[in-house]
Image (cartoon, rainbow, N blue to C red):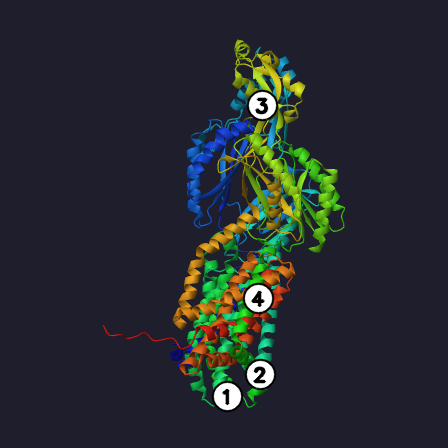
Amino acid sequence: MSLRLLNFQRLLGMVVTMLCLLGVAAYSTMPRQEDPSFPYRAGLITVNYPGASADAVERLVLQPLSDELRQVEEVDFTQATARTGVAIFNVRLNDTIYDTDSAWDRVRQAMDRARLDFPDDVGQMVLDDRLIDIPAIILAVSGSGSVTELSDVAERLKQNLADISGVSRIELDGDADEQITLALDDAAMYRLGISPARVLDTLARRNQTTPGGFVIADGRRLSVLPNSEFTSVDAIRATPIELPDGSQVPLAAAAEVWRGPAEPRQPEAWYDGERVVLVSMIMEEGSTDAIRFGERVRERLSTIREEFAPYEIREMFFQPDKVEERLDNLAWSLVMSVIIIVAVVFTGMGIRMGLLVASILPMVALISIGLYDLGGGVLHQIAVIGMVISLGILIDNAIVIVESIQGYLDDGMRRLDALKHSVKELAGPLGASTGTTIAAFMPLLLSKGGTADFTRGVPVMIMLTLSVSYLLAVSAVPLLAARFLRPRKTDAREDKLVGLSRFLGDLVARRPRTLILAGTALVVFSLSLTPFMKQQFFPNADRPQVVVELYMPEGTDQERTSSVAADLERAIRGRPEALEVHRFVGFTGPSFYYNLQREPQAPNRGRIVVSTPTLEDTTGLVQWIRDYAGREMPELQLTAGILGQGPPRAAPVEVRVYHANDDTRARAVEQVFSALRGVEGTVDVRHNLDIGVPSIAINVDDASAARYGLNRSDVAQSLYGQSFGVVAEQYRQEEDPIPLVLRSREGTSLSLPRLLSVNIYNDRGDAVPLSAIASVETSWQSAALFQRNGTRMNTVWSNLMAGYSFSQALEGLEARLAENPLPPGTRLDMGGDAEGSGDANNALLTTAPIGVLLLLFFLLIQFNSFRRVGIILLTVPLATVGIFPGLVFSGSPFGFQSLLGVIALVGIVVNNAIVLLDVMDRQLEKGDNIRDAVRKAVEQRTRPILLTTATTVAGLLPLAFSSSTLWPPMAWAIISGLLASTVLTLLVVPSVCTHVISCKVAEPENAPA
């Protein structure tokens, strides 16, 4: 096929040129983002149950909903929390699910079934199935001391930005809803003889939307608008309340009325100490260029900024800048790789041959980008890294083809004959070597899960570029070589590589047994170092930002959490390395980074994000924050660190503790917590063990209450109204209705003596003191209860110091628990990086047989010999001679990125053996004995093998020395493994051939029937 294409040179040239132009156009228009997008597999269910204790929420909400969710096959696990008045479910779909919309529909059906078992007074149940959406731009609106005023400005800004191309949706955070509070004066109401029920009834009758119809005058319809609604807060104050004697007093005589933020306090956000409302812009994923999106937003802001004066609009987090910075850095790495590869090729092959080989680089890059864009690909750092890795590999085919054509020209063959002989001779071996490399990446392409979704751009881009490079190597490159190459006049023996090739060939022919023993010893030595190798799932990110997670004890009011967070922020702002400090209280703020977990709202939670000048500055600041908080804020639990990479997780070390007995489980949690704190390298160790909160139990005497015409429900509703209040009506003169909340003057600040002296009103409006019908006692109740898949559990988390891995922490924990065993019946389940790494490895192992099958398929097609296939596969363990010692002696942990390097290495190293054995078989067919055949094979293939190795290593050097924390481990794994494998492939593989192979592959015997 390739030989026939060579007869259509003009057509071939036009197709290649048009595909390259397609790549140029695609690069300028394709969508860009920093990291890949993940499927919507994470969701959050929130169920409100006002007034219910954590125990009641668990029994009446958690259990029914857990039972229903367990029947949804797409659900992997649920993790639930029961707090006073609310149930929170974190739902995770199976990693194999990509049609997430239909899966979430089934979850909603399960929620509907569970609601049938809920008590009637359970409130709203909401599912957020877009939990992983990351805002591309987060703007902070400031300039006023009134949060409600800032909320109005933020809403107006949201409307001004909503029509920008590429916007998916815009959310507000840190804003404040409003309410109109009617604070009843209990003493005045008692004196006037009115009850809250009468006030509620009067407000309901006064605030109605009643149509007045219309009349016709002079042929026109005139609407009649009755004054049936409240038109102002003053109108509410003036509402007449009828007294028992028939007279009336305004509502203001019995209640204070004001308009203000909704109660209880809502989540709050600060930008460098100034209260702000956040406008989070979520971009359309997969179809929008983040860089151009940022430009459009800035252009719109510059246009409308004057309209919003004197309010200030600032950029809190601006992801398009990060995308541009990341892609620019990787683009420079790509350019540097090309320059280094070209320099190596020119050095090893000369200017004329080097220029022909180097010409394949821009052609493959442009054509691959064009095809990648046509397939719906998004340009992000993973895709660019795939191209960087493939640069040194894709040039191998061109090197071998050009070397072969040059050799035939040197022997005096005519140009077209040299072209056709080379393509015919090498199309099969090069196709097999390309196929084996693609087969090595097939498991990574087919595996499923968060880690596979994150790294899938690597196999996609490598497989695409290698396929294109092979097609060009057997079509366009030979045409160029035949046209521009000339027979070399210099004596080939002057080339130093020729002398090295002959030396290695003679060594293999004379000392094969010694070389085999040496190779085996090196492999055994390499494998013996694996116990000393640290494990790491993904490294930390390289952003100069410190994230401080704040955990106050369960049951802490948000006002107290806000006070502690403000104190810590002031201390941090006094540090010289703190450039910007952002504080979030009552929630953890918007998820401005893909790896940052989004937590549900809670009054005891907070987060502080600190920007520093450089990544190095974060180390000292993190340690200072830990020391300061431990010394000055003993009630505060915090974790301080930098952003991570890979799929989101709460902490690198996570231990889930199960036991049927609550007290025993609590002891086990404390034991694990203490043991983990004693393990070297662990830091920020914490647990979610519930210490409980004090509660006031109101014990109603039913007989006494009945004498006054009251029951327990009347008492409960009255007490709830005194603190939180009840919604009486809605004020409908604004864009959104504002609730009218009827409560006591003190609200949730009601003192205990005042609470015990409140009046309970019966249906007749009589005031009955609470003390006349109820007694009071204090008790200790659970503040929060935790379940996983419907089973009670608690969790212990730990961060890690720099240089330590999760495997070391878990080994230390295991050793300490062996000395001091946990209570019988306790079960531990590992999460964090151990779980993520295990899931990722299992996903690869599931698809590995497909890769192995393809690998064997291509090798058997080429060689039709199990012995030769087995010899070629020997190159894989030979690569470990460089990988494991390199990681151990450099102190680098073995993580998923290193595993990527090993996978890439498998596809690369077998190529060297393929081209070596191909020459050996041709020499055997000519009648050479096995020793002469392997000697000539080594002599002929040493030069191209060393050149292809040099280009691959050279292409990875910019990545290995880059400032990124994500890719150097992978680059060094490939470099060290490839260098060792290349040397051993040239020596050990031919030596094994001399003992295993003695003749060419036998033809099938045509035996008589």
Gap between marks 1 and 3 measured at Cα: 99 Å
The residue labelled by disc 3 is: 721
- Viewer-nearest of discs 2 and 4: 4
Question: In the figure, residue 144 lies in which quadrant?
Answer: top right
Mark 4 vs mark 3, CA separation in Å: 78 Å
Local crowd size for mark 2, using a 10 Å CA cut-off: few (<14), some (14–19), many (≥20): some
Q: Please tell me whether residue 186 is drawn above or below residue 104 in the rendered image.
A: above
- The image position of residue 923, as x and y in percent, is 44, 81
The label shown at residue 788 is none
Q: What residue does disc 1 label?
A: 410
Judge depth for marks 1 and 3 and give the one in front: 1
Q: How far apart are labels 2 and 3 at the CA level? A: 95 Å
Nearest to the eye among marks 4 and 3: give it: 4
659, 325: nearer the viewer: 659
Q: Where residue 819 sits in the image (x, y, percent)? A: 62, 41
Earlier-in-chain disc, 1 versus 3: 1
Q: Which mark is residue 522?
A: 4
Secondary structure beneath label 4:
helix
Q: Is any atom of residue 639 visible in this view?
A: yes
The amino acid on which the numbered mark 2 sits, given as a three-letter code, is: Gly
The numbered disc on residue 499 is 2
Cα distance in 3D space between marks 2 and 1? 18 Å
Q: Position of residue 73 (x, y in %)?
A: 41, 43
